[in-house]
Image (cartoon, rainbow, N blue to C red):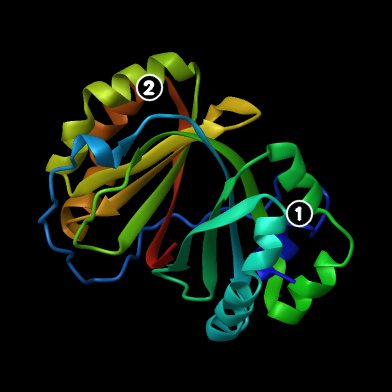
Amino acid sequence: MMVFLASCGGGGSEEKSTTDTTATKTDTTTATTTTPHPTASAIITTPQDMMVATHKVKDFAKWKASYDANDSLRTAGGVHSYVVGRGAQDTSMVLVAVKVDDMQKAKAFSNSPGLKKAMKEGGVIGAPTIKMMTIVFQDTSNVSTDLRVRTSITVKDWDKWQKAFDSTRALNEDNGLAVRAYGHETADNHKVTIVSAVTDTAKARAFFSSDMLKKRRVASGVVGEPQRFMYHVVQRY
């Protein structure tokens, strides 16, 4: 049984209560600032359904071997491996993103009998956080760093936020962040997720705490404080 989808069977609900860790103590390695300019073919704006999980594991190598050994089960359930990441601060934290053919089928598969047992056997610790997402923008061009930050925010109005975000995306690049993907929870477009490549760790850290970004969030209708999870891409399928 696949460990990631075993995780989804932890409680029968779409999303668990585990909260992402805010990335305030990132690794001290400064990533290269070289970011290739994306070609038109690398940009995907057709909405893509995805399922994203974060959870802890006892042994990452054991978990990864189990995950890779069960690709046929994911395919049978209508989900397809996309990205596996490992926490930059806590290396026992894992992020898995899979593409989904049919959301209802994927939910049913994630809650099928026996998955709790498979999760335990794979070494997953505690209840995972599961999010069903609709990703509306992806940049699939190559970047010269595997360091990513996932930012989760709540917005008052999706359309207003998206327009403001798209119009100021160059500001992220100027501050050590190259946007790789963004979207919202499938059932609630007020819950937004942004994934960025960290091209300059020091600049990104300063940007996260800057008054400029705080003002930008307020202007675009962001409610509350963002939650951030920083990780390294282990494999992209």
Q: Quadrant of residue 115?
A: bottom right
Q: Where is residue 150 shown, x and y percent of the image? A: 42, 49
Q: Quadrant of the N terminus?
A: bottom right
Q: Name the residue under label 2.
A: 162
Q: Where is residue 50 shown, x and y percent of the image? A: 56, 44
Q: Name the residue under label 1.
A: 110
User: Residue visible at 58% across and 84% down?
Assistant: 59
Amino acid type at mark 2: Gln
Compared across the picture, whether 26 is left or right of 81 comes to left
| Badge 2: residue crowd in 10 Å (few <14, some 14–19, many ≥20) | some
Residue 39 to residue 219: above or below: below
Residue 206 in view in this figure: no
Q: Where is residue 100 shown, x and y percent of the image? A: 61, 45
Select label 2 or label 1 by which is in front: 1
Q: Distance between the residues labelled 2 and 1?
A: 30 Å
Q: Is mark 1 on a helix, strand or loop?
A: helix
Q: Is mark 2 on a helix, strand or loop?
A: helix
Compared across the picture, whether 1 is left or right of 45 comes to right
Residue 173 to residue 159: above or below: below
